[in-house]
Amino acid sequence: MSVAPLQALPLDELRQRSSTKWRKYPDDILPFFVAEMDYALAPAITRTLLRAVELGDTGYTPPEPGVREAFVDFAARRFDWEVDPQTVFWTGDVMMGVVEILRAVTEPGDRVIVTTPVYPPFFDTVEEAGAVVERVPLARTDHGWELDLAAIEAALAGGARAVLLCNPHNPTGTVHSRESLAALAGIVDRHGAVVISDEIHGPLAHGAPYTPFLAASQTAAEVGYAVTSASKTFNLAGLKCAVMIGGGPAQAKTLRDLPWEVEWRTGLFGAMANVAAFSAESDEWLDSLLVTLDENRRLLADLLAEHLPQARYLVPDAGFLAWVDVSAYGWGDNPATVLRSKARVAFHHGPLFGEEGKGFVRINFACAPDVLREGIRRVGALLSS
């Protein structure tokens, strides 16, 4: 049975939202920067939250909010990944989980590898934990980006103590292969280090098989932690809830021993929404979203070929974020600033993702096709003017 795509909400409705995407810039700027989507919530989430408001159910998050069971079922159903429930814990958001795990497994001054270009909070999170960022860029190939395993091993041999992985990768949309993840686990194990994997984009893989790091091999489970959430897939960033998974009993103990406040930071509405999102009731909505995003990632390729033929863009394997090199047009190291001023479109700033982001913009394509068309048309119009 064919799956119908989701329809984005009209712009006049979206501009009534109070979130960052719709309040940071004036209404004459089309926003494509922050990772928020333009679709209505999955019906199961809407029902859950409306009922909570009707009940005045706005108190403290309970000790067992159902997040563990919902995530375990979701992982089995969507990823064919059997997760031991005793290894699953929760907190307020993914970066909160990452920084608390880093505090637990590193010492002040330890070096932590990040694979640039990468989600900008990775840099701040490592520093917040008292560690030091060690940048190991992704390797660029004819087919996309991949982990530079030799360079990661050299950094670990030089004393780095952890790898902060992004799987799937933001901003490139790369889905790391099972083989690459297993090889990474072997390298990390040899050097007595750990992997913390941000897997928030995992449910948004487009055809390319997404492998949770902890499921890549037995060794991966023995050296790894994963942190994820329904927040990116189901547009729930304002409702604070994330899931932390330990690869085995030792990692589970580390998570269990985190300060009790780490769990208490979970928002009640966030827990409710994540449980509803991870339920089978939301699978149909997610399937429709994937159809929509697949169409839009390909539409963006066509629009760039038409309006910005010198731009370089590889259709992402996962997510709704496009990593686009527009350096050929001479808009400087940070073209997003120029394009916001002259074309009235807001893209994300490439250099925030690392040195490798100079000349790049990141474009959120989780919007109506006509909005995407208008945004790229505005940029293309600069060339003729």
Image (cartoon, grey):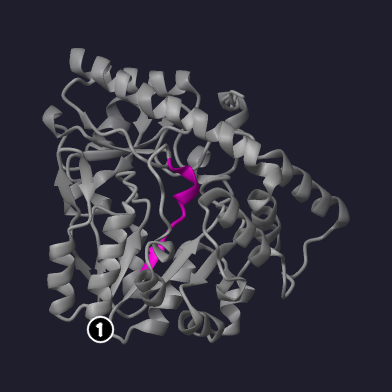
For the record, the magenta segment spans 196-205
Task: Indicate the quadrant where residue 150 lies.
Answer: bottom left
Disc 1 is placed on an element classified as: loop
Q: Is residue 77 left or right of residue 125?
A: right
Vertical position of residue 62 compared to residue 344: above or below? below
Residue 106 x %, y %: 33, 83
Asked if residue 32 shows in the view, the reply is yes
Residue 162 x %, y %: 29, 75
**Rendered-image quadrant of the N terminus:** top right
Asked if residue 41 shows in the view, the reply is no
Residue 126 x %, y %: 33, 71
- Front residue of this view, candidates 25 and 357: 357
Q: Is residue 129 left or right of residue 200?
A: left
Vertical position of residue 36 compared to residue 376: above or below? below
Q: Is residue 142 left or right of residue 264?
A: left
Q: Which residue is mark 1?
A: 109
